[in-house]
Image (cartoon, rainbow, N blue to C red):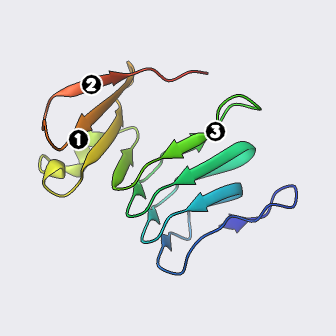
Amino acid sequence: MIRIYQGRLPQIPDSCYVDLSAQVIGDVTLGEHSSVWMNAVLRGDVHSIRVGANSNVQDCSILHGQRVLYPVIVGDWVTIVDPWPESWGPNWYETDDVYLDNTGDGYYLYDNNYPGIPIAVTVSY
């Protein structure tokens, strides 16, 4: 569902796919050919969310910034998966340049140049 919040309607190009069960609310902008999948939430109520071109927000992921301080900025060709990456299979790195994974004990960033080698990412709340 795509919803306006405080006068801000998400900006979603025609080339994007947003699943009917996803929630995209407020100050959210998707890049060309990006996608938002089942039950994902992009909540642009307290700060902006920008998702780059050819990126995707997978099932059950939640993107939400921190009021006034931190927007959510996702680059081009990024896959965000939360919270069960094992459901996506072992070959994710063959097609994706970057993969962000919440393992329950923190966030890890995987780069296609170094498949299987995680880089810890600090997420501020």
Q: Is 40 left or right of 119, judged from the image as shown?
A: right
Q: Which residue is mark 1?
A: 86
Q: CA distance from mark 1 to mark 3?
A: 28 Å
Kindly report which numbered mark, 1 or 3, lies closer to the viewer in this rendering: 3
Report the front residue among 72 and 125.
72
Place of residue 21 in the rendered image (x, y in percent of width and height, measured from the top left): 56, 64
Q: Earlier in the sequence, mark 1 or mark 3?
A: 3
Choose top left, top right, bottom left or bottom right for residue 3: bottom right
Q: Which residue is mark 3?
A: 71
Is 117 above or below relative to 28? Answer: above
The secondary element bearing badge 1 is classed as helix
Q: Which residue is mark 2?
A: 119
Q: Is 118 left or right of 54, judged from the image as shown?
A: left
Callout 2–callout 3 Cβ contact below 8 Å: no
Q: Residues within 10 Å of mark 3 (few under 14, many from 20)?
A: some
Place of residue 100 in the rendered image (x, y in percent of width and height, measured from the top left): 35, 38
The secondary element bearing badge 2 is classed as strand
Q: Amino acid at mark 1?
A: Glu
Q: Is residue 9 visible?
A: yes
Is 110 above or below relative to 56? Answer: above
Kindly report which numbered mark, 1 or 2, lies closer to the viewer in this rendering: 2
Q: Residue at x 28, y 41 (%)?
A: 85
Q: Amino acid at mark 2?
A: Ile
Q: CA distance from mark 1 to mark 2?
A: 18 Å
Q: Residue at x 13, y 33 (%)?
A: 116
